[in-house]
Amino acid sequence: MFHFCPSCASPQIQFEGNTRFRCPSCGFVYYHNIAAATGCIIDTDEGILLLVRAKEPAQGKLDLPGGFVSLGEGVVEGLRRECQEEIGWDPGLHFSFFASFPNTYPYWGILYNTCDLFFTLNAPGLHRADLHLEREEIEGIRFIKPSELLMEDLAFDSTRRVMQAFLAAYYPQGPEGL
Ligand SMILES: [Zn+2]
């Protein structure tokens, strides 16, 4: 990420313990901390709402509404903002925390390590016509029945893990019982 110290331009800068950059020449330290990110499983009468990613990483794969929490934001308000931006819909603040998994997100040559926090929201009456997509980020939407969800279509490791946990918790009987 850094080839030279951002403070004194020394090429001696080192990445230590997978957490921080340290410059032995001037003592500069920069912690490359994990970033907080959110995702929401919106369960509707038509199925679970998934977004088709328009951009890399994982272009064309399915993802949950959500994204990085911004500076100065709480997790819930960050998730609400992302829903408003990505699908043009205000979900309110009544998310229920469900699970958290780590993830990595490569962007412009930098690997961001994230702590993904996943929430659930029941929105039985939500329909396609209620949503307005952020076309730069989102190619399309799918409402997918739990029995028809394929893990290989999901964008990220954390998305696959949370959907497996969600299906096990809420749809444990599998396709036959639905
Ligand atoms: Zn330095």
Image (cartoon, rainbow, N blue to C red):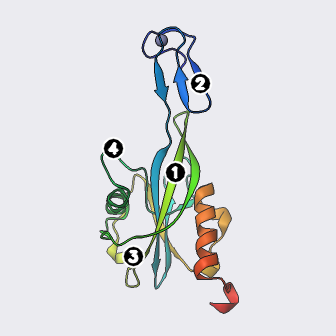
| Mark 3: C-beta under 8 Å from nearest atom of ligand 1 | no
Q: CA distance from mark 2 to mark 4?
A: 24 Å
Where 32 falls versus 124 (above or below)?
above
Q: CA distance from mark 2 to mark 1?
A: 20 Å
Where 108 falls versus 46 (above or below)?
above
Query: Could you tell me the amino acid type at mark 1?
Result: Cys
Residue depth check, mark 2 versus mark 3: number of the one nearer the observer: 2
Q: CA distance from mark 1 to mark 4?
A: 15 Å
**Whole-percent x, y for residue 153 in the image:** 63, 63
Front residue of this view, candidates 110 and 98: 98
Q: Residue at x 58, y 11 (%)?
A: 12
**Whole-percent x, y for residue 17 in the image:** 62, 30
Q: Earlier in the sequence, mark 2 or mark 1?
A: 2
Q: CA distance from mark 4 to mark 3?
A: 31 Å
Residue denoted by label 2: 15
Where 37 falls versus 48 (above or below)?
above
Horizontal side of residue 100 vs 73, given as left or right: right
User: How many residues crowd mark 1 within 10 Å: few (<14), some (14–19), many (20+)?
Assistant: some
**Whole-percent x, y for residue 60 in the image:** 56, 57
Q: Earlier in the sequence, mark 2 or mark 3?
A: 2
Q: CA distance from mark 2 to mark 3?
A: 46 Å
Residue denoted by label 4: 71
Horizontal side of residue 105 vs 84, given as left or right: right
